Image (cartoon, rainbow, N blue to C red):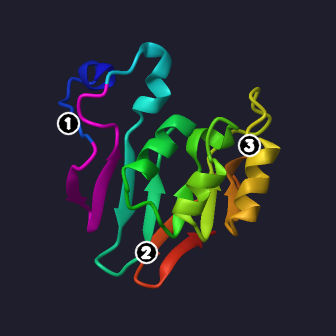
Amino acid sequence: MRVATACQTGAVLHHAGDKFDFGGAHFEVLSPERGATLTVRDKDDASLVLRASCGAFGASALLPGDIHKKIELAMIARGRALRVDLLKVPHHGSNTSSTEEFLAAVHPAMAVISDGRHNSFKHPRPEVLRRLGAAGARTFRTDELGPVTFYLDASGAHLKR
């Protein structure tokens, strides 16, 4: 909201269960829950979690922001549709997320980790990379590749080099 105010534009708040279409893609909001009370300390867990899909039978992607294990497990417990072709790895590959349970539910063919080269947090964490490998995800890292672009279509998710 502060950014919207600073830019003198409006903001639309979305909560779990909301759905909308944008640019030919369909989006479903998986988190945060409506009425969830999060402290400033929990701000990462207030991240908007989106499941994007390309048509009824097209590829899908999960964009979970900076959520931690607590929110991953809550989405699984609520029966959210998590299985996707492409996962934007939560919280830059921090060990506070990307649990085995979450990766089993998401079962991504590909995963992308958005992190900076030589970042002070040492992301992505080696244990997260091991979990992604064990889950069968082909993993791409922006600290190694630089900016990456993925496309979703009826045949799956594709990396554009």
Q: Where residue 50 sits: x, y (%)? A: 37, 51
Tell me the magenta residue range. 16-36
Q: Is residue 16 left or right of residue 109?
A: left
Q: In the rendering, which numbered label is found on residue 135?
A: none
Decide which of tag 3 and tag 1 comes sooner along the chain: 1
Q: Are marks 2 and 1 in contact (CB under 8 Å)?
A: no
Q: Which residue is mark 2?
A: 59
Q: Secondary structure at mark 1?
A: loop
Q: Amino acid at mark 2?
A: Ala
Q: Where residue 54 sits: x, y (%)? A: 34, 72
What is the spatial separation of the Cα atoms under label 2 and label 3, in whole angstroms?
Answer: 25 Å
Q: Residue at x 42, y 35 (%)?
A: 47
Q: Residue at x 41, y 78 (%)?
A: 153
Which image quarter holds the C terminus?
bottom right
What is the spatial separation of the Cα atoms under label 3 and label 1, in whole angstroms?
Answer: 31 Å
Q: In the rendering, which numbered label is found on residue 12?
A: 1
Q: Is residue 49 left or right of residue 12?
A: right
Is residue 7 among the parts visible in the rendering? yes
Is residue 68 among the parts visible in the rendering? no
Which image quarter holds the N terminus?
top left
Q: Residue at x 60, y 53 (%)?
A: 101
What is the spatial separation of the Cα atoms under label 2 and label 1, in whole angstroms?
Answer: 26 Å
Decide which of tag 2 and tag 3 comes sooner along the chain: 2
